[in-house]
Amino acid sequence: MKRATRPLPQPTVSDQVLDAPETTVLDLLDNLLNKGVMLNGDITLGVAGVDLIYLRLSTLLCAADRIFGERYEPVASPPRRPRARRRRPLKRRT
């Protein structure tokens, strides 16, 4: 008597999206910066149930060439010179 074998289940769409063993964190970050990400957040600081400070934060994260275009060349800041220490004359003890 032969045993009946069940066919292997076909991967669902969610399995294909969530199971990406070839993707690294660096790939994910590169993809996010190439497409751009908008982050919004609200912070409320309060004491004893009284709201004292309300902050609304928004930021846009993307690659610089997405904002400035392909011809953007960043301007390098001039090198900093070390400050010269001012020498003070020695005081004589009396």
Image: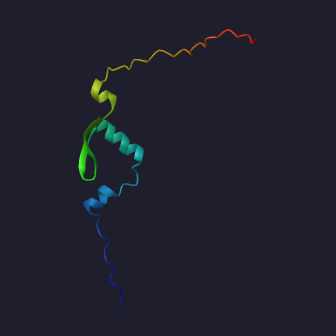
Q: Is residue 86 left or right of residue 32?
A: right
Q: Position of residue 43 (x, y in %)?
A: 27, 45
Which color scheme does this rendered protein use? rainbow
Q: Is residue 93 left or right of residue 18?
A: right
Residue 15 lies in quadrant: bottom left
Q: Position of residue 2 (x, y in %)?
A: 36, 87
Viewer-proximal residue, 7 or 85?
85
Query: Which residue is painted at 37% across and 42% down in the image?
Result: 29
Q: Position of residue 89 (x, y in %)?
A: 67, 8
Number of numbered discs: 0
Q: Is residue 86 left or right of residue 31?
A: right
Viewer-proximal residue, 74 or 24?
74
Q: Position of residue 14 (x, y in %)?
A: 27, 60
Quarter of the image with the N terminus in it: bottom left
Q: Is residue 12 above or below residue 66?
A: below
Viewer-proximal residue, 22 or 67?
67
Residue 62 lies in quadrant: top left
Furthest residue toward bottom: 1
Furthest residue toward top: 89
Q: Is residue 80 above or below residue 66?
A: above
Furthest residue toward front: 94
Q: Is residue 21 left or right of residue 45?
A: right
Q: Is residue 69 above or below residue 26?
A: above
Quarter of the image with the C terminus in it: top right
Query: Which residue is painted at 31% across and 77% down in the image?
Result: 6
Query: Which residue is painted at 44% across and 17% down in the image?
Result: 77
